[in-house]
Amino acid sequence: MEIAPKKELSLFDSTCIIVGIIIGVGIYETAPKVAAGVGGWAGVLGVWLAGGVLALTGAMCYAELATAYPREGGDYVYLSRAFGSWAGYLFGWSQLAIIRPGDIAMMAFVFARYAGTLYAPFENTRTVYAAVVVVVLTAVNILGVKAGKWTQNILTVIKALGLVAIVVAAFLAPAAPAQTSEPAEFSMGGLKLALILVLFTFGGWNEMAYVAAEVKRPQQNIVRSLILGTTLVTVLYILVNGAFLRVLGYGKMVGSEAVAVETVAAVFPDIAGRAISVLICISALGTVNGIIFTGSRISYAMGAEHTAFRALGKWSPRSGTPALALAAQGVLSLAIVLVAGSFVETILYTAPVVWVFLLSTGLSVFVLRRKEPQVLRPYKVTAYPVTAIVFCCFCAFMLYSSVSYALAIKPVGLLVCSAVVLAGAILYWLTDIRGRT
């Protein structure tokens, strides 16, 4: 008897998955660079608001698709139905082979870097810390959905409260002198870079769609969690940037290399550095756990339909999880950690592949409405087709920008990603296509 996923995720659980994955370490790293590109206070707050609105347009598109097709795999399901099994296969292959393991390893290294500032008893501490994170969190998620979701819930609540604490500290501190808030020269190039960084920092708003089959009352809670989670993060990001500006002023914020530490140090100078390091470690752990949880569902969905990955398409009767998919994802992530031994810069070059599939999923809203009009859609994109068009346009912009960046900085990274996708296409042809003839 085939074991299927159980509906174990409440609205709170689903929202924590979204919030916990979005709020990683990006807000601490990108805020000064974003500020530098937009010219002043109004530009800083405006570009973060714009990023939230753009992410919300995507959340609405995914809400329609996820409630119409509440199954494991998210984009894998939508792309397969809209464009054919090859499209879903290439998405699943890309996620399994490079994107998910790379993202997990990258965030594990971020955790290791900050954990090493707190305690580093031996050499190669970062590699050991990163490897331990991958192994432990993969094991937690293999043990059961409840273990994985409660780990996510706890980490998400802590990291969200940490951001709130930064905002509170900022309002306890004296405001920055007027001379530190002089605006910089505005440029379209600076705005373009700022928007790229903001949208990167908002990444993860669509993750809940991958676990749609496990959501209780999916017709209501999928929509609510996608929109609530994205909105909550937008509010937090705007408040945190407002806190940075209030304490440091625009000029000092742009030049800061540790913007959160400097903000908190205005009130608590003795503990600011360690406190922010702990918060960033927790934020990284929450993102890693969330990516592990959701990413395994993509591999599970692909394995259930494609012969080459059939072993991954099994739901464990003992743990109630896609245990083999989780294990395979963990092994690949661990391999990257052990081989790379440091922060993996080339992982950033997977961005073009990510945006290709996001754009394709946005287009699938239009395709599936025409192709499968009989399917019940409990939620339809608000202000359709304008909202869906805006989402597709910003995906196209991000695709163009990420390809341009990769070509200008290190084109070999783009070639590697393209080669991985091509290898997936060849494997699809050798297994699924030939298997049917």
Image (cartoon, rainbow, N blue to C red):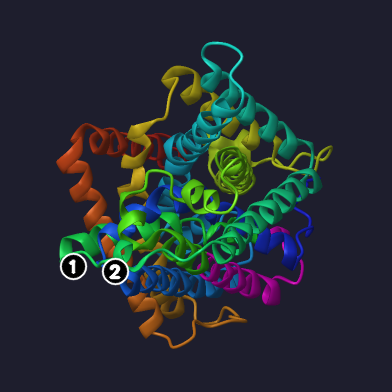
Q: Horizontally, is 19 left or right of 179 in the view?
A: right
Residue sitting nearer the eye, 327 or 258 = 258
Residue sitting nearer the eye, 287 or 325 = 287
Q: Horizontally, is 349 left or right of 78 in the view?
A: left
- Residue 157 point in image, percent of width and height: 70, 56
- Mark nearer the N terminus (2 vs 1): 2
Q: Can residue 437 be seen here?
A: no
Q: Residue at x 74, y 36 (%)?
A: 140
Q: Secondary structure at mark 1?
A: loop
Q: Residue furthest bottom?
A: 383
- Residue 425 point in image, percent of width and height: 35, 40
**Based on the displayed image, in which of its 4 quarters is residue 235 positioned?**
bottom right
Q: Can residue 155 be seen here?
A: yes
Residue 40: image tag = 2
Residue, disc 1: 186
Residue sitting nearer the eye, 338 or 265 = 265
Q: Residue at x 47, y 25 (%)?
A: 336
Given contact means CB atoms under 8 Å apart, are the residues at marks 2 and 1 in contact?
A: yes
Q: Horizontally, is 271 left or right of 387 in the view?
A: right
Quadrant where the N terminus sits is top right
What's the distance in space between the residues labelled 2 and 1, CA to CA?
A: 8 Å
Q: Residue furthest right?
A: 318
User: Is residue 149 shown above or below 226?
Assistant: above
